[in-house]
């Protein structure tokens, strides 16, 4: 019988190129009540993120194809995934390695080898913190609408793009939908941020939803 924990119904994405570590960590986390999806490198993890949305990412730093630093950069730049807590696992334990990992966008940096109980404690702590932030943001958003200049006009293409953004689609997905390059979509998003004075895709999506453009 599985142990009872906050892991019930929580989905974790575990990324590491070491199959033995994947097996051990996956078994331990599943025993604690988590659903665990795995990937062997950052590139494969991005494909997984296109299909499903985990509650947390546990990621090795040094991997082939795409390392942990590059993956976290992608995760933080995408409004769909920017909120997901990330825990780095690394064999590098020097202070400069920890600083680099945290500055890149990871929330927690753990050095291998680690105690499984410590990993679970860090996962549960990060999930609780993320949950508090989500509720806090919902509370603050409830009382205030996104403010933009009253004379903002979007082109027909920009309007289509912002509709997809409001649906939570990544730039890559929108590019495939409209049969254009991802760079073209990024340019449209950048233009709309300039016109509206908003700071990121999340605010752009909120503005579109609040003004019935979605």
Image: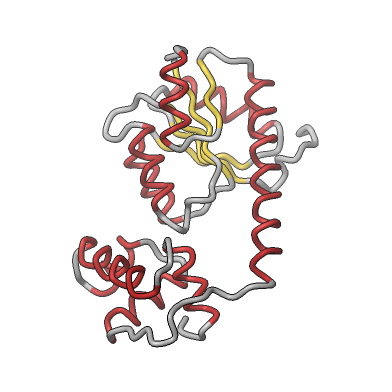
Residue 76 position (above or below residue 192):
above
**Which of the 4 quarters of the picture holds residue 189?**
bottom left
Residue 108 position (above or below residue 117):
below
In depth, the one of 43 and 182 nearer the eye is 182
Residue 49: image location, x then y, percent: 43, 51
Q: Is residue 65 left or right of residue 33?
A: left
Tally the numbered discs.
Answer: 0
Residue 205: image location, x then y, percent: 47, 71
In depth, the one of 146 and 48 nearer the eye is 146
Q: Going 48% across and 51% down the picture, which residue do you hit?
A: 82
Residue 204: image location, x then y, percent: 44, 70
Q: How is the image coloured?
A: secondary structure
Q: Quadrant of the N terminus?
A: top right
In depth, the one of 148 and 171 nearer the eye is 148
Q: Going 42% across and 37% down the picture, which residue do you hit?
A: 39
Q: Going 27% across and 71% down the picture, which residue do you hit?
A: 188
Q: Is residue 11 left or right of residue 68?
A: right
Residue 102 position (above or below residue 153):
above
Residue 31: image location, x then y, percent: 69, 31
């Amino acid at each position: 019988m599985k142990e009872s924990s906050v892991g019930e119904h929580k989905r974790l994405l575990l990324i590491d190129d070491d199959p033995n570590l994947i097996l051990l960590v996956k078994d331990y986390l599943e025993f604690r009540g988590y659903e665990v999806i795995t990937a062997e490198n950052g590139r494969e993890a991005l494909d997984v993120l296109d299909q499903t949305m985990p509650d947390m990412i546990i990621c090795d730093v040094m991997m082939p194809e795409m390392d942990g630093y590059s993956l976290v950069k992608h995760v933080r730049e995408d409004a769909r995934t920017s909120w997901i807590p990330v825990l780095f696992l690394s064999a590098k334990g020097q202070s400069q390695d920890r600083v680099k990992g945290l500055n890149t966008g990871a929330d927690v940096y753990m050095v291998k080898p680690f105690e499984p109980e410590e990993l679970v404690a860090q996962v549960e702590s990060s999930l609780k913190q993320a949950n508090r932030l989500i509720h806090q943001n919902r509370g603050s958003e409830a009382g205030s609408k996104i403010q933009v200049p009253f004379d903002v006009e979007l082109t027909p293409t920009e309007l289509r793009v912002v509709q997809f953004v409001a649906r939570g689609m990544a730039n890559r997905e929108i590019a495939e939908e409209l049969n254009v390059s991802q760079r073209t979509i990024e340019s449209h998003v950048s233009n709309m941020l300039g016109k509206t004075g908003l700071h990121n895709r999340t605010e752009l999506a909120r503005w579109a939803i609040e003004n019935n453009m979605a």
